[in-house]
Image (tube, rainbow, N blue to C red):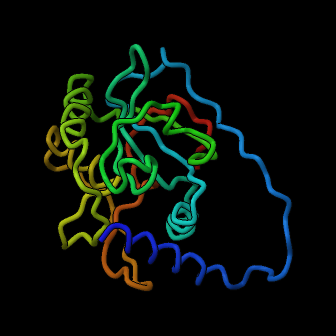
């Protein structure tokens, strides 16, 4: 179940962080929303990477040795930029599902430390649009975090499946995990950053 998955991710994160200093206190830091790309730079089909703030996000970044923990796809640029992405808790009223979010919500301070945008160079403009339309058709579908050999739908696999409607042979390396309850291959956001892309807004890159 997705909620159980979140608890397992959180437990795994804290297990990996036992080396941290115990007993120290830090002042509460008020987060500031990251810089956003100008809307006129973006096109439908662009990929939006997020460096998240949650425990799960830090775990993903740690495991994949990446700055990125989440990814979505631009499906509208006017009158506002909107992103389709599969997530657990961006919207408390719609947990564990594929969301259609404003870019400002996707990059809100409570969710994002930084944002980056890339355009897949290996797809034509029409293919990028069609991949975005495919992703949008899944808004409201259930979020499923599972290994490659099981039914799954999370941020990276949603995007992968959308791209494969245009290029059936598209594939990226999957990462093998063997921690807590997570055993098998998972697709990390960093792999999309390593694809053939043009960086439109490189506020956060590796």
User: Quadrant of the image for the N terminus?
Assistant: bottom left
> Viewed as shown, does residue 69 lie left or right of 5?
right
Most extreme residue toward the front is 93
Give how far across and how far down residue 76 sits, in percent.
Answer: 34, 23
Give how far across and how far down residue 192 sits, in percent.
Answer: 39, 49
Give how far across and how far down residue 24 sits, in percent.
Answer: 86, 76
> Viewed as shown, does residue 136 lie left or right of 43?
left
Can residue 51 be seen at all in this image of the molecule?
A: yes
Relative to 153, is 204 above or below?
Answer: above
Residue drawn at (44%, 30%), measured in percent from left and top? 102
Residue drawn at (27%, 72%), measured in percent from left and top? 147
> Viewed as shown, does residue 193 lie left or right of 185?
right
Residue drawn at (50%, 33%), measured in percent from left and top? 199
Between 137 and 157, which is closer to the camera in this rendering? 137
Q: Quadrant of residue 144?
A: bottom left
Relative to 119, is 8 above or below?
Answer: below
Between 206 and 23, which is closer to the camera in this rendering? 23
Relative to 162, is 12 above or below?
Answer: below
Give how far across and how far down residue 105 sits, in percent.
Answer: 50, 36
Residue drawn at (65%, 37%), measured in percent from left and top? 33
Between 147 and 88, which is closer to the camera in this rendering? 88
Between 25 and 48, which is closer to the camera in this rendering? 25
Can residue 193 be seen at all in this image of the molecule?
A: no
Q: Quadrant of residue 157?
A: bottom left
> Viewed as shown, does residue 56 lie left or right of 158?
right
């Amino acid at each position: 179940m997705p909620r159980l998955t979140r608890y397992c991710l959180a437990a795994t994160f804290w297990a990996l962080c036992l080396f941290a200093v115990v007993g120290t206190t830090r002042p509460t830091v008020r987060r500031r929303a990251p810089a956003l790309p100008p809307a006129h730079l973006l096109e439908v089909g662009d990929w939006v990477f997020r460096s998240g703030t949650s425990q799960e996000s830090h775990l993903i970044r740690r495991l994949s040795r990446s700055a990125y923990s989440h990814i979505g796809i631009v499906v509208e640029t006017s009158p506002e930029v909107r992103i389709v992405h599969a997530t657990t808790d961006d919207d408390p009223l719609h947990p564990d599902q594929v969301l259609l979010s404003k870019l400002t919500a996707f990059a809100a301070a409570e969710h994002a430390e930084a944002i980056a945008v890339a355009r897949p160079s290996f797809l034509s403009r029409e293919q990028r649009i069609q991949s975005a339309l495919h992703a949008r058709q899944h808004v409201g579908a259930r979020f499923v975090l599972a290994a490659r050999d099981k039914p799954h739908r999370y941020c990276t696999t949603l995007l992968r499946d959308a791209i494969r409607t245009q290029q059936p042979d598209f594939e990226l390396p999957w990462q093998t995990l063997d921690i807590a309850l997570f055993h098998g291959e998972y697709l990390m956001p960093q792999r999309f950053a390593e694809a053939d892309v043009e960086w439109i807004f490189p506020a956060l890159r590796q």
